[in-house]
Image (spheres, helix red, strand yellow):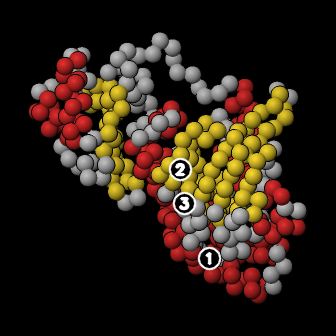
Amino acid sequence: MIELKDLNKSFRTAAGLVDAVHDVNLRIDDGDIFGIIGFSGAGKSTLVRCMNLLERPTSGQVIIDGTDLCGLGRKQLREARRGIGMIFQQFNLLSQRTVEANIRYPLEIAGTPKAEASKRAAELLEMVDLADKARAYPVQLSGGQKQRVAIARALASNPRIILCDEATSALDPITTASILDLLKRLNEQLGVTIVVITHEMKVVEQICDRVAVMSDGRIVEQGSVHDVFLRPTSDTAKRLIEPSQGALTIDNTPNTLRLAFTGEESGAPVISDMTVQCDVMVNILSANTENIGGKAFGQMLIQLPDDEAARQRIRAYLDSRGILYEESAAVPPAEPVQEEGPREVRAEREKLEDAAVREGSVL
């Protein structure tokens, strides 16, 4: 189990002190696939690097299976890190080594005999469907294949935890889906706990059990993926869940409802029935359906009529059907929605996180 208690991480820069992670409290149970999602500069990469102390927290605790990593000495920390694998966005493979040698590398560092390390590498290549690439070099592989090698390398020392820092953001959608399927299969087969850092809601929807939403260094919302998708409470979650980029949103369109459909209702003719029962026409602004945990979930933005009596009938109908909905303000806000956090602080945090990822090392 992973527990983060009152976790803070600050960086001192020329512009002043930047709080990349602020007062984070989080619990991730054994065997979970846990997503941490947010926009660029939210503090996600810094947070995940605090979990294995690649970034040492300014204050707070990182407790893995009852042990506070922040209180360990250097030797003890190295030993604890063998139980935590990490997968990076840019793969971080050694170009001069073959695929098999890349996978053997963490075992060699740990002093594992070469024959045993080679056997383990062969097993992992079978597991990630790359048995025929053992003698290839990274330059000969596609992006998806490189990430599979990185996953195999992260599994080399039989870790209990795998940390994925934007592991699919450099891949195309089809390859991303295959990598996520692989991670889910490994979770089911090995029981390994997986923490996924991402800015893409589709990644969370496809494989995660639970999710935490980050904004400006803080956890602003957390819960099951199902609940966050159907009942987002933070502005960040609502923006991440919008049906499509550039679509009309409940925040910038007056007199709209956002409907959230569960698996049972997503195929029902709700809008058709509502127009008949309420004797009113509505305008559908946008809609989509997602597969979450093998079930279909949908959302729809509809524009309500100007007549308040008609709007009341619509609300009553939705309440009677048990359909979740969220209503916009009657008039648009006077001021445009501002981006999260001071611009200079966000920019500084993004630079720090980008630099940290580029300097990432193999555990």
Residue 169 appears in the picture as rendered? no
Q: Name the residue under label 3.
A: 33
Q: Kindly identify the residue that appears in the image at 37 percent across and 24 percent down.
A: 328
Residue 335 screen position, x and y as percent:
51, 14
* Quadrant that contains the C terminus: bottom right
* Quadrant that contains the N terminus: bottom right
Residue 284 appears in the picture as rendered? yes
Q: Quadrant of residue 248?
A: top left
* Upstream in sequence: badge 1 or badge 3: 3
Q: How crowded is mark 2: few (under 14 residues within 10 Å), some or many (20 or more)?
A: many
Is label 2 in a helix, a strand or a loop?
A: strand
Residue 156 screen position, x and y as percent:
70, 74
For residue 170, side relative to residue 94 (left or right): left
Q: Residues within 10 Å of mark 3 (few under 14, many from 20)?
A: many
- Report the amino acid beneath label 1: Leu
Q: Mark 2 points at which residue?
A: 211
Q: Mark 1 points at which residue?
A: 125
Q: Kindly identify the residue that appears in the image at 73 percent across and 83 percent down.
A: 118
**Gap between marks 1 and 3 measured at Cα:** 22 Å
Residue 209 screen position, x and y as percent:
49, 57
In the depicted structure, whether residue 340 falls above or below residue 128: above
The number of callouts visible is 3
Looking at the image, is mark 2 or mark 1 nearer the viewer?
2
Q: How crowded is mark 1: few (under 14 residues within 10 Å), some or many (20 or more)?
A: many
* Upstream in sequence: badge 2 or badge 1: 1
Disc ID at residue 151:
none
Asked if the residue at tag 3 contacts the one at tag 1, i.e. Cβ–Cβ closer than 8 Å, the answer is no
Asked if the residue at tag 1 contacts the one at tag 2, i.e. Cβ–Cβ closer than 8 Å, the answer is no
Is label 3 in a helix, a strand or a loop?
A: strand
- Report the amino acid beneath label 2: Val
